[in-house]
Amino acid sequence: MTFHIHIKGIVQGVGFRPFVYKLALKHGLNGNVNNTTDGVHINLKCSAEKANDFLNSIINNAPALSVITGFSINEIQDFDFDDFQIIHSQDNMEPNLLLTPDFAMCEVCREELHDQENRRYHYPFITCTNCGPRYSIITGLPYDRPLTTMGKYNMCDTCNDEYHNPLDRRYFSQTNSCEKCGVKLRLYKNGVNIQTDDYINYVVNAWKEGEIVAIKGIGGFLLTCDATNENAIKLLRNRKQRPSKPFALMYPDIDMLKEDCYIRDTEEAELKGIVAPIVLLKIANYPKRKLNISQIADDLDRIGVMLPYTPLYDLLLKEFQKPVIATSGNISNSTIVYSNEKAIKELGNIADSILVNDREIVLPQDDSVIKFSKKHNRKIIIRRSRGLAPVYINEQLELPDKTFIATGASLKSVFAILLRGNIYISQYLGDTATYDSQLNYRKTLEYFFEILDFTPDMLFVDKHPGYFTSLFGKDIALKYDIPIVSVQHHKAHFAAVLGENNLVDSREEIMGVVFDGTGYGDDGNIWGGEFFIFQNGKIKRAFHTDYFDFILADKMVMEPRISAMAISNGIVEANPFIKKKFSDIEWKIYTKLLKGQSGLKSSSIGRLFDAVSSLVLGIDKQTYEGEAAMKLEIEASKYLKDKNPDLKMSYIKNNQISDIIKTIVSGVVQDLNKNLGKELIAARFHISLVHYIKNISEEIKIKNLAFSGGVFQNGVLVDLIVDLMDEYYSLYFHKQLSPNDECVSYGQMIVGMNEM
C-alpha cells in the first residue's frame, strides 16, 4: 500500500524535510518527501497502521520552529520505493502556505560562532535550518535557495557537502554559507569604500570614539552608538531629527542587562526567544551602566532593550562589552532604509560610518516591540514586525473559501490578506501620511500579489475617505473590478479582538470597549471613546464618551494643551490652569473656534489622556505620538505601586454613564487646587476610566467585555481592569496583534468574513 501525507502551515525553512527523512529512517520506511507551494508532501510504501503511526510521530515531534495548521493522509496508487529520499521542491501548484518569518540566531550557531575550532568561527552570517533570515529574503515559493537572495552565492565544497548530507544539521539549509563562499561586508565613510581587515574592531573603535555607525541587519539598517556616551546620543538625536522619542538599546548578553534592568521570566524568555524583539523593561534603581536615561528614554520608567539576534551584532557587542543605541536607520517618521545604495546616499548624513553587506533584503522590517503589564504580567504587543510577521495562526477561526484584502488604517498601517485558507498580516508599515511610507506599503502589497499569485474577490478599507490606504484600496478594487466595503475604524478594532478570541460565533452578547486617539465615525465626527454591543453577528454602537470640540486637526493631536482647552471648555475653574498655556492671540482665536457650532466633535479617550497630562504634568506639546499618555501612566504607576486600587478613588459616581469627561476634568482641577500630588491624580484618572467601563457594562447588563484601541497599550489601565473587574466579568484582550491600529486590517477582514 502507498500513502500520501500532506502537511500545511509553517513547514518550509524550518528543517521539516530533514526531520521527516530522519524519522523515516528511524521507522524503517521507504518513500520520499518534498516541498511544494502548498506545503510538505510525503509518500510512503507501508501498511495503513505504519503510515498513521508515522503521521502521529510527525505531528507530536515536529521541528520547534514549525507550526502545523493542517494535515491529511490518503491512500494513493501503489508505487515502489527503494529507499527514503528528499526530492527537489516543486512549484507547479498555486501557492498555499504560510510565509516563514525571520528567526533570531539559535544557541547552537552562537556556540559555533565563538568556537575557535569551528570553521565558521567569527563568520558574521552563520545560520542553520533553525535560524536566520526567511521572510526578508524570499523572492518566490516554495522556500528554496534559488528563490531567495542567497541564490547568487555558490556554496564551497564543504558547505555543499553539508547542504546535501541528510544527517547534517545544515541539510537543505537555504541560507547555508561560510566565510569562503558567503556574504561579504563592506564599510563606507563619506560615501567612500574603506578598506579594513577587521570590520568588528573598526566599528567597536568607532563606538569608543563617540561615532554613529549604521549597520545592515536582517530587516534593514540600524543606527548605533555607545549608549553610555551622552554626546554621541545627543548627536544621533540631532542628526536623526528625533528630539525625545525613546531609543532602543542592544545589550551584549542577558547577564549585563540584568545589572541595569529588572527582568521577569516572561520578559527574559521573549528576549532570548526566536523572535528576539525589543522588550520594554523597568529600569533598575541603580543601574551599573551609567546610562543617561533622560537622553535615552526621555525620563520614562522603562527602556526598550534587545539582545543580539544576528551573528554580526553578537560579534560586535561581545567585543564592545557595553550596550549600544540601536534605532531604525531612517530620519524620524520615514521608512527604515534597507538597500545599500540608499543607505550610502541617505544615512551618510546621520552616520559617520556605514557597514553594509551584499545579501539583499527583499522587504524591510523594523524590530518588533512588546511589553508586559507590571502587576498581572499581561503581554501587550506594541509593534508587530520582524520575527512575528507575516504569520497569523488561529486554527479555530472558520475561514471562507474567498480571497480578501483589507488595507487597514493610516497610522501604524498594516494590511491583511485571506487566501486559500491562510491569513497573512503584514509587518508594521508606518504612517502612510508620508510618501516614503506609501511607496513601501505599495511595494509590500505588490510583493504579496507576486509571490502568492492571486486575484482578490473583495476588498475592505477604513471608512475615512482621505486615508491613503482607503484611496489605494479603491485603486485595487477598480483594477480587479471587485466590490469594496468601507468598515468603520472602531468597529474594525472590536472585530479584531473578537476574532483573536474566537468570539465571532458567540451566542452571548459581548461589549466592545474601544479607546484610542482618532477614528472617522459613522456620523462624520472623530470617535475614540466607544462602547459597542456584538450580538447575532452584528456590531452596533451603544454608548460613547461625551462629545467635545475637535479643533485644529493634527495640531490638536500634537499639542495636549489644545485638548485641555477644548475638553475643559465651560469649566470655569479650569481657566486659570489653561489660559496661561496660550498667548493672548492664540487664546482669542481658539476661543472663537470653540464658540462655533459647525466644527467637528470628538469622543476620543486619547485626547482626554492628552488633556489630563497637560493639566497635571504640564505637557503642552509632545514630540511623538503617545508621549503625554505614557508619562501619565508612569505617574499613576508610581502611586499604585504596592497599593490595592479601589473604585472609591474614582472621580465619577456609581452608575454614572454621562458627562464623564466634564466630571473627570472637574475632579482633576479640584485636586490640583488642593495641591494633591500628580501621582495620586494620575491614579484617580486611570481608576475613573475603569469605573466608567464598569458602569456602562452594568447599564447594558453584559458580562463579556473585549478591549481594543491604542489606549490599551497602557499596562496600568489593563492591570486595573483585571484588578477591579476580573472577578465578575469575562475579559478579552488582544493576543497575537497589537491593540493599536495595526489590528485594524484584521478587524476589517473579520467584519467582511462575517458580514457584520
Image (cartoon, rainbow, N blue to C red):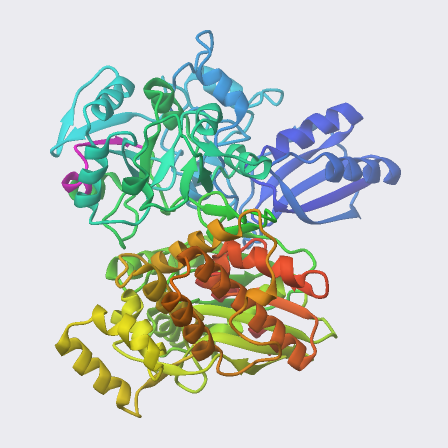
**Residue 610 position in % (x across, y down):** 36, 66
**Residue 578 position in % (x across, y down):** 27, 72
The foreground one among 95 and 475 is 475
The residue positioned 52% from the left and 27% from the top of the image is 106
Quadrant for the C terminus, please.
Answer: bottom right
Asked which quadrant contains residue 650, the reply is: bottom right
Relative horizontal placement of residue 582, taking residue 217 as reference (left or right): left
The foreground one among 583 and 508 is 583
**Residue 68 position in % (x across, y down):** 67, 45
Q: Is residue 126 above or below residue 363?
A: above
The residue positioned 44% from the left and 29% from the top of the image is 257
Relative horizontal placement of residue 1, taking residue 677 as reference (left or right): right
The foreground one among 322 and 214 is 322
**Residue 363 visible in rendering:** yes
Q: Residue furthest front?
A: 674
Q: Is residue 297 above or below residue 534?
A: above
Magenta-drawn stretch contains 750: no
The residue positioned 46% from the left and 82% from the top of the image is 546
Asked which quadrant contains residue 306, the reply is: top left
Asked which quadrant contains residue 700, the reply is: bottom right
Quadrant for the N terminus, please.
Answer: top right
**Residue 537 visible in rendering:** no
Magenta-drawn stretch contains 356: yes
Q: Is residue 191 above or below residue 554?
A: above
The foreground one among 276 and 190 is 276
Image: magenta residue range: 347-358
**Residue 85 position in % (x across, y down):** 66, 29
